[in-house]
Image: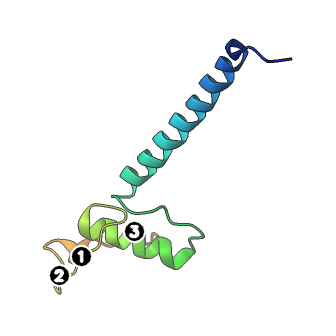
Amino acid sequence: MAVPFEALIPYGIILAMFGATGAGLSKFRNWQNGGKRARRSLDQWDRQMMDRDRRLTGFLRGQSDAPLAPAGFEVNNPWRVEKRFT
């Protein structure tokens, strides 16, 4: 007995929505990372270097090949010092 094709239309719609959602999320992650693939298994060193790159270039995944840091970077320190005891 044949299945009428009208019964398969909802499954096609669901499959198309899953595909559109997956493609949209992939594109958003790509845009969020500056056109680069998402990074996985980040350790403390990777996070520290990514934060440094963000402070240098303004983008989390941006990198700079300039031999000198931009003006103002010498005081752009991410370390938070604790208050001294008095």
Q: Residue at x 17, y 71 (%)?
A: 72
What residue sits right under mark 2 in the picture?
66
Q: Residues within 10 Å of mark 3 (few under 14, many from 20)?
A: some
Q: Are marks 1 and 2 in contact (CB under 8 Å)?
A: yes
The amino acid beneath tag 1 is: Ser
List the single residue furthest toward the right: 1
Spatial distance from mark 1 to mark 2, Cα to Cα? 6 Å
Depth check, front residue: 1 or 38: 1
Depth check, front residue: 39 or 72: 39
Relative to residue 18, is residue 74 depicted above or below? Answer: below
Q: Residue at x 15, y 74 (%)?
A: 70
Residue 1 placement, left or right of 13: right
When asked about the image quadrant of residue 36, the answer is: bottom left
When asked about the image quadrant of residue 64, the answer is: bottom left
Can residue 4 be seen here? The reply is yes
Relative to residue 16, is residue 1 depicted above or below? Answer: above
What residue sits right under mark 1 in the picture?
64
Q: Where is residue 22 shown, x and y percent of the image?
A: 54, 42
Can residue 85 be seen here? The reply is no
Of pointers 2 and 3, the one earlier in the residue sequence? 3
